[in-house]
Image (cartoon, coloured by chain):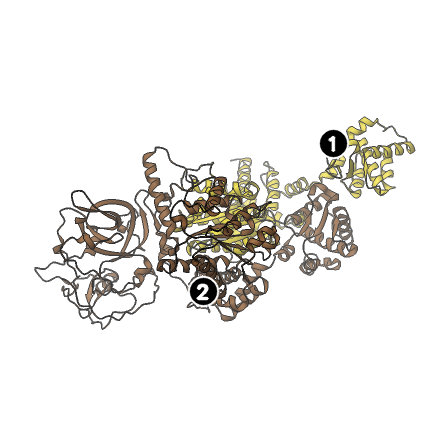
Chain colours: A brown, B yellow
């Protein structure tokens, strides 16, 4: 054993390809057996001394009497020649068997791209009887560790902590992995061959039982893995052994939520302990911010559609346009972001660290919060790199507070982790910021406080805002406040003592213009061919003309993609072969989406409403022209209606029915009216321009004479 | 089996059809343009593609918004069992943020078999909701919030909508907010920052067209041939029904009825009465049933109120009318009494009553809402001195007097002048 020669291998990065059978988490990768990452398997001595660390994944012996390491082949043998050899091997995606390229018939020159299935599996799929090559006599096919693990003769675990017992033996606490076969749901059709589940089962294990490293990766890493050897596995889900349910591992999608994860994990543990200790169950939704029983949530089976779904271009486009998705780059806000990061850096890098205050304003959907958070992420990486001092960051949203005063409590909890009443919190915060009393070393860090929707904190005497904005002015506060709100002149509307503290430094986020919107949309759609270019331009021009709200623009495009998708799917379900259309989102779809988003539907409703409602509306317009007054009373209107009805040989329905008709119209706010109990005294007014009514009713086929009165 | 027995069975069958929205809206939902398939597509695509959406269902009352939503939800629950949690809120009950969040937490706890505490604070509940959204997203479960009377949620600070829609901007959550409202301008009620987060899908529910009504009538009223009902009875029933449906008079009745309000629900109510009127002896529907239903449903409450008045009350109404004609816009009981007295002086009849009797009659009129106080001020004043107004109009009063069984001629004369 020992170091093997590295087979030369072009590091070809395959695009993730989609196929209906294999889930997209790249079973398509060919793993070339090659150099093992870990070197000193045989370096005798205390393995656990340095080799295994907290956070590593390892194979663990299942039974005490399991055979020792020496029988375990380090390298997998070729299924044809049964030699481990140094040549490049290719892995079958179905049986995971390895083959030397030269042993194949016909021999392959390079590792093929995409899925590759060995001839045996292929034949088996076609229903033929397959004779696998027999190993040469005297040599039985050695199973690798991976084989053993996947056939549950071995275990894998994640090392949580390592310690030395009093008797000198080393132990570690491991979190088990499990193979799909051992879960309650069994192997599901979408499971990958190399898939493992992380369980919430922990055990203390002696170090002796570790065999060697394995590598359990999340799908993204797994997709990139090429030459990592035989011992790599993929893990996307956590399996709850108590409830037999699955849940995605949280930190896969975005790294910045890691903080939350650890909290929740702790909660789980503590809740489990609590449940074990106390007989009665704890309420899920209260208990000082800890939630109990969340571990119960989980799917019994992982739904197939999530993993075995071949995404079309349109679906990819829709997924890329989802607001929740954090784009890789944030175009068009570089200037503002620089300004903010300069401000924050200037504030914390000062040796004195004087408190400062920044006010950010701009209409909704212009990326205010997103930019600040992006700046904070960048700063965090700089902190990790060590170029700036550590600081603490507190993020509060005004609209998510039950009352403005609660902000003290939230800030205090974020800073120290203790929950106190808001009055106590105010007192403690005052002590900390204005009197400079610090309890621990932690407290000495500068603190950045981000308050979103600042205008919600305005109380009658504005004391909350005053307190918060007063702290930065104190000499030892080390507090930096960043306030975000929509209105430009919020500081001016406040008391002078507040505006003088807040309004000095401002950053304005103007509405996006159409080029910027276009850039934002196209940057998200990079690499996805689903939109016509003019369609994007049209949407961005339209939004820029109305609000300049990026969320709107994205939503319009998503809706347009949805409409296109809807039509395609309906067509293909109704008529057998879908006319292989362009599949591109064009102007008409965007137009429809814009129409749906911005147009009030009143004209359509007026057109389709009942006959009497139409007469009622026409009478209102008639009355409006006759008197010139916008407001009319029901009595007058009923007279007009009865005149109109008699002169056109239409039966007058009676006052009470007419009143009901008016109230129906009032309910959908086509007209504004007082409650119907006022009867003939009820005041009525059109809620839309009379031209809209005329336009809607002019050419009604049902009652052609209505046009006379419009 | 006697015909009465059969008829009763048929009646029960049709009535139960009328009361189940599933039966009514299912046949209308096949085509691609129907709201059903659009809504189902939006919700199921957000389940499949794990994204968030918010939809508004708009349309006049009785046009089947909630019915279609429920239909879609029940279909989806069947299609994706275990992956959908439906949270139902009603604006009339939960428009206040605190109670709404509490209700959401309660329903989430119920759905996932967690223990719920009513003592939890607003903060606790909102954090719980966000944590649950996250966990559900991780477990590939979609949470659907159905907000009935959506416009009522758009009052005040809109904290609930904001925190819901803001929570939906995180990657892991997988939620759909469906707002149902009869106000066409419901999305305009949202605050700017809430509206910006709302993903404006709108579905408009319109009353059925004439052809749809015809199809609906046939669909509801005709009996199935392959049920427990005797085949020949069902055939005869359907035959008679066809002749009624084709009848011109019947069409007139229906169009007359739908003239005022053409929504589906309105039609169903009418049919229910008509079916209840069905004569069990003959065992079949007849045109008379529909006619009777129309006259029993199209009532004129104010007119009937006038018909029920006593002579003295009519006198008071007429006197008030005369005051209004003279453009005396503010008057109270005393001035009405003065007018009553002067009328009586010029045309002495036996119908002259003492003031306390008149006051009692006046109070009756107030209770029946034929007259009302002009404003809400002056609760402390006694009734005699508060200003009143006539609620019924001149034309209604006149008509009412004409149709009154024994209206004194003098009253008719007085009102004409």
> What is the x, y in percent for residue A62?
18, 48
**Picture residue at 42% right of the left edge, 39% below the top:** A287
**Dividing the picture into quarters, in which one does residue A202 lie?**
top left
Residue B320 in sight in this render: yes
A250 with respect to B101 (left or right): left
- Can residue B214 be seen here? The reply is no
Query: In this view, which residue lies farthest toward the bottom?
Result: A109
- The numbered mark at residue A524 is 2
Badge 1: residue crowd in 10 Å (few <14, some 14–19, many ≥20): few
Give the camera-side residue of A646 and B76: B76
Q: Secondary structure at mark 2?
A: helix
- Quadrant in the picture for residue A74: bottom left
Indicate left or right for B340 with A29 as reference. Answer: right
Q: Is residue A154 left or right of residue A307?
A: left
Seen at 33% across and 40% down, the residue is A272
Residue B70 in the image, given as x and y percentages of width and height: 50, 47
Secondary structure at badge 1 equals loop
* Residue tagged 1: B380
Separation of residues labelled 2 and 1 (CA atoms): 68 Å
Residue B381 sits above or below residue A566 on the image: above
- Confirm whether circles 2 and 1 share one chain: no
Measured as percent of width and height from the top left, residue B16 is found at 53, 41
A680 or A638, which lies in front? Answer: A680
Q: Which circle marks residue A310 in the picture?
A: none
In the image shown, does B231 or A357 lie closer to the viewer? A357
Using the image, determine if residue A506 lies above or below residue B311: below
Say above or below: B46 vs A429.
below
Number of marks: 2
Looking at the image, which residue sits at the far right? Answer: B346
Residue B191 at x, y percent in the picture: 57, 52
Quarter of the image for the C terminus of chain B: give it: top right
Residue A38, quarter of the rendered image: bottom left
């Amino acid at each position: 054993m020992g170091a093997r020669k590295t087979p030369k291998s072009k590091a070809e990065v395959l695009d993730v390809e989609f196929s209906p059978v294999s889930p997209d988490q790249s079973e398509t990768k060919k793993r070339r057996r090659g150099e093992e990452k870990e070197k000193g398997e045989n370096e005798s001595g205390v393995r656990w001394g340095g080799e295994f660390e907290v956070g590593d994944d390892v194979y663990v012996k299942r039974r005490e009497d399991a055979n020792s390491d020496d029988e375990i082949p380090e390298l997998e043998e070729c299924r044809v020649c049964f030699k481990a050899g140094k040549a490049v091997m290719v892995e079958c995606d179905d049986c995971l068997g390895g083959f030397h390229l030269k042993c194949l018939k016909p021999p392959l020159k390079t590792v093929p791209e995409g899925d590759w299935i060995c001839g045996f599996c292929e034949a088996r799929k076609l229903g033929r009887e397959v004779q696998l090559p027999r190993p040469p006599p005297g040599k039985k096919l050695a199973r690798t560790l991976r084989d053993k693990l996947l056939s549950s003769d071995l275990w894998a675990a994640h090392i949580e902590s390592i310690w030395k017992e009093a008797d000198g033996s080393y132990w570690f606490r491991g979190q088990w992995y499990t193979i799909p076969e051992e879960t309650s749901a069994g192997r599901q059709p979408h499971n990958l061959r190399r898939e493992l589940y992380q369980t919430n089962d922990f055990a203390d294990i002696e170090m002796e039982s570790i065999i060697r490293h394995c590598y359990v990766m999340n799908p993204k890493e797994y997709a990139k893995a090429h030459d990592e050897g035989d011992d790599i596995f993929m893990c996307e889900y956590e399996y709850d052994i108590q409830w037999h349910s699955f849940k995605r591992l949280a930190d896969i999608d975005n790294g910045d939520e890691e903080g939350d994860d650890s909290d929740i994990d702790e909660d789980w543990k503590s809740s489990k302990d609590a449940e074990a200790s106390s007989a009665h169950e704890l309420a899920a939704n209260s208990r000082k911010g800890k939630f109990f029983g969340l571990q119960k949530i989980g799917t019994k089976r992982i739904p197939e559609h999530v993993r075995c779904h071949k995404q079309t271009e349109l679906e990819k486009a829709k997924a890329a346009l989802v607001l929740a998705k954090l784009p890789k780059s944030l175009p068009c806000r570089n200037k503002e972001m620089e300004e903010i990061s300069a401000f924050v850096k200037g504030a914390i890098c000062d040796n004195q660290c004087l408190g400062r205050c920044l006010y950010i304003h701009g209409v909704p959907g212009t990326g205010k919060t997103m930019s600040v958070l992006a700046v904070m992420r960048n700063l965090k990486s700089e902190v990790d790199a060590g170029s700036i001092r550590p600081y603490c960051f507190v993020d509060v949203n005004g609209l998510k507070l039950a009352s403005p005063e609660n902000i003290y409590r939230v800030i205090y909890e974020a800073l120290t982790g203790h929950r106190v009443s808001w009055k106590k919190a105010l007192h403690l915060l005052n002590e900390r910021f204005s009197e400079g009393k610090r309890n621990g070393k932690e407290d000495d860090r500068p603190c950045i406080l981000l308050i979103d929707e600042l205008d919600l904190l305005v109380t009658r005497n504005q004391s909350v805002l005053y307190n918060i904005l007063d702290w930065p002015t104190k000499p030892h506060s080390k507090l930096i406040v960043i306030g975000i709100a929509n209105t430009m002149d919020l500081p001016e509307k406040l008391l002078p003592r507040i505006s003088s503290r807040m309004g000095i430094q401002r950053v304005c986020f103007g509405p996006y213009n159409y080029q910027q919107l276009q850039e934002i949309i196209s940057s998200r759609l990079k690499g996805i061919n689903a939109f016509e270019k003019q369609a994007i331009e049209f949407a961005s021009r339209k939004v820029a003309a109305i609000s300049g709200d990026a969320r709107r623009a994205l939503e319009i495009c998503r809706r347009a993609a949805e409409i296109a998708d809807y039509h395609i799917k309906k067509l293909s379900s109704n008529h057998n072969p879908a006319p292989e259309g362009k599949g591109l989102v064009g102007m008409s779809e965007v137009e429809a989406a814009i129409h749906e988003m911005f147009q009030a539907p009143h004209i359509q409703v007026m057109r389709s409403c009942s006959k009497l409602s139409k007469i009622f509306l026409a009478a209102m317009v008639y009355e409006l022209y006759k008197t010139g007054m916008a407001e009319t009373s029901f009595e007058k209107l009923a007279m007009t209606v009865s005149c109109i009805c008699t002169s056109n040989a239409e039966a007058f329905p009676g006052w009470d029915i007419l009143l009901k008709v008016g109230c129906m119209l009032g309910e959908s706010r086509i007209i504004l009216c007082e409650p119907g109990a006022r009867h003939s005294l009820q005041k009525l007014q059109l809620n839309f321009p009379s031209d809209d009514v005329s336009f809607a009713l002019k050419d009604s086929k049902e009652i052609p004479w209505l046009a006379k009165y419009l | 089996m006697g015909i009465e027995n059969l008829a009763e069975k048929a009646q029960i069958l049709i009535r139960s059809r009328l009361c189940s929205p599933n039966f009514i809206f299912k046949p209308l939902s096949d085509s691609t343009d129907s709201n059903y398939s659009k809504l189902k597509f939006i919700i199921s695509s957000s389940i499949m593609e794990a994204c968030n959406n918010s939809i508004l269902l708009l349309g006049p009352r009785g046009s089947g918004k909630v019915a279609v939503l429920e239909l879609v939800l029940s279909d989806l629950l069947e299609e994706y069992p275990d992956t959908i949690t439906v949270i139902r809120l009603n604006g009339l009950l939960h428009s206040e943020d605190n109670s709404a969040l509490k209700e959401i937490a309660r329903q989430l706890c119920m759905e996932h078999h967690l223990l719920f505490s009513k003592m939890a604070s607003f903060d606790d509940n909102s954090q719980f909701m966000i944590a649950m959204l996250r966990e559900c997203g991780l477990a590939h479960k979609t949470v659907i919030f159905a907000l009935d009377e959506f416009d009522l949620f758009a009052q005040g600070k809109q904290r609930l909508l904001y925190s819901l829609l803001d929570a939906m901007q995180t990657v892991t959550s997988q939620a759909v907010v469906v707002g149902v409202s009869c106000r066409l301008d419901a999305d305009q009620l949202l605050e700017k920052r809430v509206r910006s987060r709302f993903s404006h899908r709108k579905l408009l529910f319109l009353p059925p067209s004439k052809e749809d009504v015809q199809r609906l009538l046939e669909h509801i009223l005709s009996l199935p041939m392959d049920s427990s009902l005797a085949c020949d009875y069902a055939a005869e029933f359907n035959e008679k029904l066809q002749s009624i449906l084709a009848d011109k008079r019947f069409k007139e009745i229906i169009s007359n009825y739908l003239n005022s309000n053409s929504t589906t629900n309105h039609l169903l109510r009418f049919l229910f009465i008509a079916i209840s009127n069905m004569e069990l002896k003959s065992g079949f529907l007849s045109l008379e049933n529909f006619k009777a239903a129309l006259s029993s449903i199209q009532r004129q409450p104010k007119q009937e109120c006038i018909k029920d008045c006593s002579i003295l009350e009519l006198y008071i109404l007429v006197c008030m009318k005369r005051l209004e004609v003279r453009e005396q816009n503010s008057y109270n009981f005393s001035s009405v009494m003065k007018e009553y007295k002067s009328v009586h002086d010029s045309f002495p009849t036996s119908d002259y009553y003492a003031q306390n009797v008149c006051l009692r009659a006046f109070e009756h009129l107030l209770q029946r809402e034929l007259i009302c106080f002009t404003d809400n001020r002056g609760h402390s004043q006694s009734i005699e001195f508060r200003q009143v107004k006539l609620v019924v109009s001149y034309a209604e009063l006149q008509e009412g007097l004409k149709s009154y069984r024994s209206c004194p001629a003098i009253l008719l004369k007085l009102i004409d002048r």
